[in-house]
C-alpha cells in the first residue's frame, strides 16, 4: 500500500511503539498530530522521524469560500507551531504545472506574497518585521537536464533563507481523503516520490536549512485501490503505471491551492496579511 | 462498463445481429472495421449506427518514430476510405489542453496544415487541388458561457466545409488499450461524453455536414477497472468520479497526437504533404 | 498621422462641421463626448459616424487601486448611457494575448463575469434580472485559417446577444495618451486596424447587433512620432513597420484591463456586482 | 545613443586605438570580428574588453529556411572559434517569454539539445564524446523575489559546466539591424541592460566560468531613433520609457531563435547533431 499520509500509515498499523498521536476536533475539522520518534517506528510506517500534522476537512469544505478561510486559519496556526523563529523563508512549488494532479505546488507558490525584492529596493514600504520571502516553482524552468533537488539546493544555498517551505501533491491510499486532507511535516519530501534514491529527498538533512513540507493528497495508485478491494493485482503489469484521480481534479487543485496559499501567507505575515495583499497586487 | 471503443463493445457481446466486422493484419498492426447497421445493434452496443475503424498497434509502437510513421500512413488510408470527395475540411480539436488526458484534440489540431487563409490571399503558392483546411481548438476560447456544440456548430456553419474532422480523447474499458488504439468513426462524438443530452452530440445529424471523429483511448473509469476484477463497487459513491490514467500520460498524448496529425495531413494533402510542410513551416 | 482616438482627430482639425463635442471634468478625470454626425465629418476625421466617449485620467491613475475604482465607476456610467436596454451581452476580447501591447482585449474579457451557462443550468442562483453574459477571446482559438470577423460573426449569430462589447488595444498619435485614455464608441472597430477592407470591420452594420467598442491606446506608430517632431520619414521604408510602446507595457496592460473589466461588470450587473463576484469565483 | 552592438559602437567612432577589426564576406553574409583590447577602448565604446563577432545577414534571410541553415552553420563556426575545449555547457535563455521582443532567449534555449540527464542515467545511448548540456530559462521560474544574476549564479555553481552560453534580445541603434544581425561575445551581458549596477553583469568575472553571450537586436530606444533624425528630445520626458520594435516582432523572434538554436546545437554537437535530434525527439 502506497501512501504519503502519515495518517493513513498509522491507521493501518495500530499500536506501533515510538509514536505519539494527538487528535483535536476544531472548528468542524479534525487535527491529527503524529510524532514519529524512533527509527524503528519510522521504518514500520515508511515515514522519516519527525512531526506530521494533518487537517482533515469535510468533503465539501474546500469548495466553500468561508470554510476555506477557516481552514487557512487553522493551517496557519499549525504552521506557526511547527516553525521556530525565522526572518526569511523560501517557498517552493514542486510538481508540473501542466499536469492537473501535479499542479498544486506551482499554483500555491504563485499566490504567496513575495517580499524579498521589496526588502532589497524599497524596504520602507514594508511593515516593520515583515519576513524576507522569495518563492519559485522548481519545474517550470523550461528545459533543463537538472533534477529538482539540484535546483532547489542551488537556489536555497544562494538565497540562504531561515526556512524552506515545500509544496507538493501527495498520493493517498484512500479515495475519500483526496482533496480534503492537508498534511504538514518537518521531515522533508521526495519530489516525484517513489523513485526514492537518497539524493532526491528534500529535507533539512540534504538542504541544511529547516524544512516544512505541505501537501494535499490528489491521487491514489491503481494498485492500492484494487488491493483495498482484496484484488490480486500481481499478474497485471500495466496496473503499476496507472494512477487514479477525480474527474474534477482541476477545480480540486485550485481550491486546495487557495487554502494553502492563504494559510502560508497568514503564517508568514500574520497581522500584516491585509496590508501586504494591498501592496503587492 | 463504460467504453468509447466499438471494438470493446463488440468483444463483450458476441454474435449481435446487425453488425458486420472485418479484421485485417497489416504492417504489424490490427485493423478492425465494424459496421453498426441497425438501430437494435446500436442500442445493444451503445454506439450509434455507422462505421467504426480501429487500428491497434503494439504497446511500444507509439514511442518509436518509424512505427509512428507506419501507423500514420495506415490511418491516412483508412480516413480516405471513410470520406467521399471533399474540397474543404475543418479540423476541430476537442478537450481541454491543460488536462493531460484531455489534450489530445488540441495537440493534434495544432499540427494540422491550415491552408484556408492561403487560399484566400496567396492561392498561387499552393499546389493544384490543395483542399481548403481550417482548424481550431474548441475549448481554448478562454472564458465563454458557450457549449462546445454551440461553438462548433456556429463556426462550421460560417465556414461551410465539406467535412468536419473531430479529434478527442476517449475512454476505454481495458488498460491495455490505452495509448495504442486509434478509433475513427463517421457517427460523431459527444464531447465531455457521458453527459449525453441529445443536443451535445457532434454528428452529421446535428451539424448537417459529414463528420469524421478520431480518437485514442487515454483513460479508464475506476468503476470499470474494478468491475473487471469482479469487485462490487455499488457502495462506493466516490468511485463514480474517479478516472484511471497512466503516469506517463503526457508523453502518451504527445506521441498519439503526432500520429493523428500526420495521418490527417496525409489523408488531406496526399502527395503534397512535403511541399505544404515546407510552405507552412 | 495615424490614430484610433477621435479625441486626437478633432484636436488636430478644429471647427469641423457635423461634430458635436461636450467636455466634463469629473472626479479628477476629463470626459469628452464627441458625436460625429455627418458623412463629411466622418471622412475628415477618418472615423465613422457615431458617438465617441473618452475618459482621460492622470498619468499615474491607472497604477493606483483607488483611482482605478473611480475610473471603473465613471466608465460604467458612460457605458450605460451609450446602451439601450439589453438582457444579454457578448463580450469579445480582440488581439493576441501573447503580444504585450495587444493583450488588452483578452485580459479584460477573462475578468468579465460570465453568466450564460448559469442561466442555462442553475438560473435560480442568479439575482433577479441578471443579464445573460457570454465572453470569449477571438484570437486564442489556436490554429485557424479563419479571420477574426468570421469567428465573431459566427458566434454572435449563434448566441444572439442583444449587445456585443468589443475590447481592443488602440493606437494613439501622442505618447502622453498611452495607458491613460479610455475610448468607448458605438461605431465599431477594425481588428488589426489599418488593413481596412470593408469586411473586416466589426460593427452593427456588419454584425446586425448593436456594438460597443472599448479600447485604450497602448502604441504609437514610429512614423507618427517622427512626424510630430517635424522629421521627414519618406525615405525610411523600414519605419513603416515599426511601433513605439512603453517599456512597462505589461503592467500598463494589466492595470488598464482591470479598469475595463470592472467598468464593464458594473455596467452589466450594477448593484449585483458583489453578489456575482462571490458566486462566480 | 544606446546600442548593445559593438558593430554600431565602432561605426560611430572611427579610429579608436586599442581595437582590432576584421571583416569577412562569406556565403552572402558579413562577418565582423572586433577585439576590444584596452580599457580605454572599452570605455570609449561602452563595451567591456573582449571579442565581439557579428554576423550580418540580408534583411529577408531569416525568413528563408535555406538561408537560416546557412546562417546557423556560419554561427556554429564562429562559436567554435570563440570557445576553448569544453566537455559540458549550460545554455541559459534570458528575458521574459511573454514579452515578444524579449522572448528570444527562452525560445532559443527550448530548442537546444539537453543531454545532462541522459549522461546521468543512460549514457550508453549517447555518441562517444557528446558534451554534457543543461539548459534553462532564467525568467520563467514563476514568482521569485530573486534576481536573474542570483539564479544563474546559483545554478551554474551547482552544475559546474565548463562553459555558460547566454542568449538574450539586444537593443540596436539602427532599425535596419533589427532581426538580421547576430552578435556573439565573450565579455558577458547585463540582463535587463541599462540598469547596470555591477552585480547584475553575467560574465566570466562574476560567474567564474567562461561565458559566451549570443544575441540578436530586436528593439531600438525611441530616443535613439529621434536622435538619428537630429531631433532634440530633451524636453520629452515620456520618450525615455519608449521602445521601438517591428510589428512582425513575433515572427522575427521565432526565425531568429531557430538560427540561434541550430547554430548552438551544431557548435555543441557537431557531427552528432542528427543522431541527437533523433534521440531527443
Image (cartoon, coloured by chain):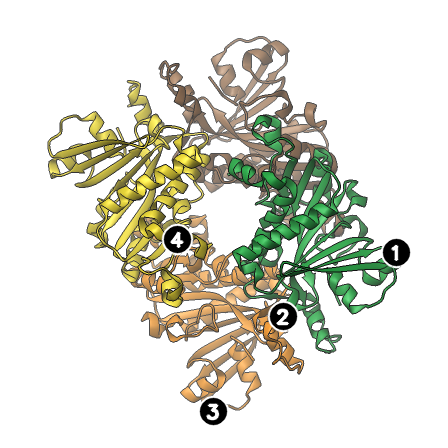
Chain colours: A brown, B yellow, C orange, D green
Q: Is residue D93 left or right of residue D212?
A: left
Q: Is residue B24 left or right of residue A60?
A: left
Quadrant location of the N terminus of chain C in the rendered image: bottom right
* Chain under callout 3: C
As measured in the structure, the alpha-carbon distance from the residue carrying label 1 to the one carrying label 4 is 54 Å
Q: Position of residue B1 (x, y in %)?
A: 26, 28
Q: Give the CA distance from mark 1 to mark 2.
A: 46 Å
Indicate which disc residue D39 carries. 1
To the question of a shared chain for discs 1 and 4, the answer is no
The label on residue D266 is none
Gap in Å between the C-alphas at discs 3 and 1? 66 Å
Label 3 Cα crowd, 10 Å radius (few <14 / some 14-19 / many 20+): few
Q: Position of residue C155 (x, y in %)?
A: 33, 60
- Using the image, name the chain to which the residue with label 2 belongs: C
How packed is label 4: few (under 14 Cα within 10 Å), some, or many (20 or more)? Answer: many
Q: Is residue A272 visible?
A: no
Chain ID, mark 1: D
Marks 3 and 2 close (CB-CB < 8 Å): no
**Vertical position of residue D180 compared to residue A28: above or below:** below
**Considering depth in this image, is C216 or A181 the residue closer to the camera?**
C216
Q: Mark 2 = which residue?
A: C58
Question: Quick check: A9 left or right of A243?
Answer: right
Disc number lying in front (3 or 2): 3
Total marks drawn? Answer: 4
Residue at image location 66% in from the left, 52% down from the top: D168
**Identity of the residue drawn at 47% across and 24% down:** A172
The residue pinned by badge 4 equals B113
Amino acid at each position: 500500500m502506497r501512501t504519503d499520509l502519515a495518517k493513513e500509515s498509522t491507521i493501518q498499523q495500530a499500536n506501533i511503539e515510538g509514536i505519539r498521536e494527538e487528535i483535536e476536533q476544531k472548528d468542524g475539522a479534525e487535527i491529527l498530530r503524529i510524532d514519529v520518534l524512533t527509527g524503528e517506528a519510522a521504518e514500520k510506517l515508511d515515514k522519516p522521524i519527525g512531526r506530521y500534522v494533518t487537517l482533515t476537512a469535510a468533503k465539501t469544505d474546500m469548495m466553500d469560500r468561508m470554510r476555506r478561510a477557516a481552514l487557512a486559519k487553522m493551517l496557519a496556526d499549525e504552521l506557526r507551531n511547527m516553525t521556530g523563529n525565522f526572518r526569511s523563508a523560501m517557498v517552493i512549488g514542486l510538481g508540473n504545472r501542466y499536469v492537473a494532479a501535479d499542479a498544486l505546488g506551482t499554483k500555491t507558490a504563485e499566490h504567496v506574497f513575495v517580499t524579498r525584492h521589496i526588502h532589497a529596493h524599497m524596504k520602507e514600504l514594508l511593515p516593520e518585521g515583515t519576513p524576507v520571502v522569495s518563492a519559485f516553482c522548481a519545474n517550470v524552468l523550461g528545459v533543463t537536464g537538472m533534477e529538482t533537488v539540484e535546483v532547489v539546493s542551488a537556489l536555497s544555498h544562494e538565497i540562504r533563507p531561515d526556512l524552506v517551505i515545500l509544496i507538493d501533491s501527495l498520493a493517498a491510499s484512500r479515495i475519500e481523503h483526496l482533496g480534503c486532507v492537508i498534511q504538514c511535516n518537518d521531515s522533508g519530501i521526495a519530489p516525484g516520490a517513489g523513485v526514492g534514491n537518497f539524493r532526491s529527498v528534500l529535507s533539512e538533512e540534504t538542504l541544511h536549512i529547516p524544512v516544512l513540507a505541505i501537501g494535499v493528497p490528489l491521487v491514489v495508485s491503481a494498485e492500492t485501490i484494487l488491493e483495498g478491494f482484496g484484488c490480486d493485482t500481481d499478474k497485471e503489469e500495466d496496473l503499476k503505471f496507472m494512477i487514479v484521480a477525480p474527474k474534477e481534479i482541476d477545480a480540486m487543485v485550485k481550491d486546495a491551492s487557495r487554502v494553502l496559499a492563504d494559510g502560508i501567507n497568514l503564517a508568514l505575515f500574520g497581522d500584516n496579511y491585509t496590508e501586504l495583499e494591498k501592496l503587492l497586487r
